[in-house]
Image: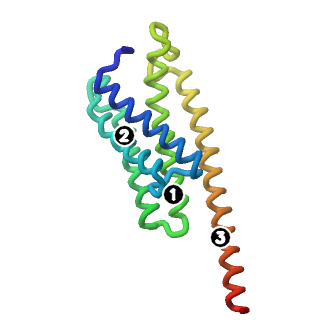
Amino acid sequence: MFGITAFGMFHTVLGLIAVAAGFVAIARHHEIAMASRSGRLYVWMTVATCITGFFIFHHGGFGKPHALGIVTLLVLAVACLAERRKPFGRFSHYVAAIGYTLTLFFHMIPGFTETLTRLPEGRPWASGPDDPQLAQLIGGVFVAYLGLMVWQGLRIRRERRRSQVVHDIASADHAGG
């Protein structure tokens, strides 16, 4: 079916589960985080997708998709570290949220490429991974993801300010009472 092996289909299913979990995490919690069930599912399915992708050699050897898998794992590691250990101080929440969201965008690159170079069957939308139409589409999706990342950053800042105001009010009440 569509020139995909059973292992390729397994890899694709892992990726689809990861993407669905990522969008669920963003819809429910406004970000992907290991603190949520959907966030954990996203991270672990993304790791599994990357690892299985290392065993797919569509064009004969190590290539751009494998490099993207390595970059994805590195960004996930930094995001996880930022979420759990807070090495970036007050910026750790931003690094985690934006890092996880960036990896969700990374899923879109092979997702669109593989889908649109195969479908519609017999006359695919894109002629290959270097098709300019495909590059424009992925560029447009990247702009949308930049908007999402900016929105997340502004939301985190707004929540931080709100919690600081609540803290200041509580401190003032405690000091005055």
The residue at the point 51 percent across, 39 percent down is 105
Q: Is residue 85 above or below residue 62?
A: below
Give, as a three-letter code, the residue at label 1: Val
* Dot 1 crowding, Cα within 10 Å, few <14, some 14–19, many 20+: many
Q: Quadrant of residue 117?
A: top left
Give, as a three-letter code, the residue at label 3: Ser
Q: Is residue 6 left or right of residue 124?
A: left
Q: Is residue 34 above or below residue 17?
A: below
x and y percentages locating residue 65 in the rendered image: 37, 33
Secondary structure at numbered mark 2: helix
x and y percentages locating residue 44 in the rendered image: 37, 46
Q: Is residue 120 left or right of residue 173?
A: left
Secondary structure at numbered mark 1: helix
* Dot 2 crowding, Cα within 10 Å, few <14, some 14–19, many 20+: many
Q: Are marks 1 and 2 in contact (CB under 8 Å)?
A: no
Residue beneath disc 2: 69
Q: How many marks?
A: 3
Mark closer to the observer (3, 1):
3
* Dot 3 crowding, Cα within 10 Å, few <14, some 14–19, many 20+: few
x and y percentages locating residue 155 in the rendered image: 65, 57
Image quarter where the N terminus lies is top left
Residue beneath disc 1: 95
From mark 3 to mark 1, how far is it between C-alphas? 19 Å
Give, as a three-letter code, the residue at label 2: Gly
Secondary structure at numbered mark 3: helix
- Say which of 99 and 19 sits in front: 19
Q: Which mark is residue 163?
A: 3
Q: Is residue 177 above or below residue 7?
A: below
Q: Are marks 3 and 2 in contact (CB under 8 Å)?
A: no
